[in-house]
Image (spheres, helix red, strand yellow):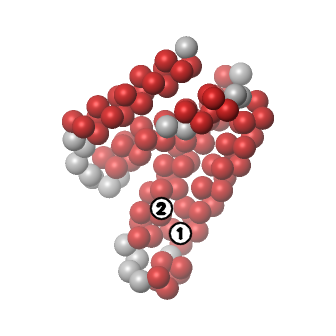
Amino acid sequence: MIKYYLILIIMTFMGSIASLFLKKTSSAGNFISMLKNINLYIGGILYVISALLNIYLLKYLDYSIVLPMTSITYIWTLIISAKILKEKITLNKVLGVTSVIIGVIILVI
């Protein structure tokens, strides 16, 4: 059972990394430039893999567990935003992610 939770954590991380690549695509300029940007395709592929992992997990874990636990993506996103994009992390953002962590812990218990 623990392997499925590890896959779930990997799935959420991939989703956050996919968003990072799409964020990088957004700075490409016009629509045609975005279509030529490799980051668009890397992000899209990561999203597809993440979705396939999600479908796989639903075969073995309850929907009422998998869907709420996908909110772990917000934790990864906050970390990526701070470390890679150098975004300012406010108290409200930290409190929000802390609430997510508490919710996931309660859900798993």
Q: Amino acid at mark 2?
A: Phe
Depth check, front residue: 102 or 24: 102
In the rendered image, the residue lying farthest to the top is 109
Q: Residue 47: where, in percent of width, then height? A: 60, 55
Is 30 positioned to the left or the right of 67 in the image? Answer: left
In the rendered image, the residue lying farthest to the right is 59
Residue drawn at x 55%, y 38% as measured from the top left: 70
Badge 1 local density, few (<14 within 10 Å), some, or many (20+)? many
Location of residue 89 (image quadrant) = top left
Badge 2 local density, few (<14 within 10 Å), some, or many (20+)? some
Please tell me whether residue 4 is drawn above or below residue 39 in the rendered image. above
Is 6 positioned to the left or the right of 86 in the image? Answer: right
**Mark number, residue 63:** none
Q: Amino acid at mark 1?
A: Leu
Label 2: state its secondary structure: helix
Residue holding disc 1: 40
Residue drawn at x 66%, y 50% as measured from the top left: 51
Please tell me whether residue 89 is drawn above or below residue 18 in the rendered image. above
**Sequence order check: which comes first, mark 1 or mark 2?**
2
Please tell me whether residue 30 is drawn above or below residue 97 in the rendered image. below
The span from disc 1 to disc 2 (Cα, nearest Å) is 7 Å
Residue drawn at x 67%, y 32% as measured from the top left: 63
Label 1: state its secondary structure: helix
Asked whether the beta carbons under mark 1 and mark 2 sit within 8 Å of each other, the answer is yes
Residue holding disc 2: 21
Location of residue 75 (image quadrant) = top left
Q: Residue 16: where, in percent of width, then height? A: 49, 49
Please tell me whether residue 22 is drawn above or below residue 63 in the rendered image. below
Is 55 positioned to the left or the right of 67 in the image? Answer: right
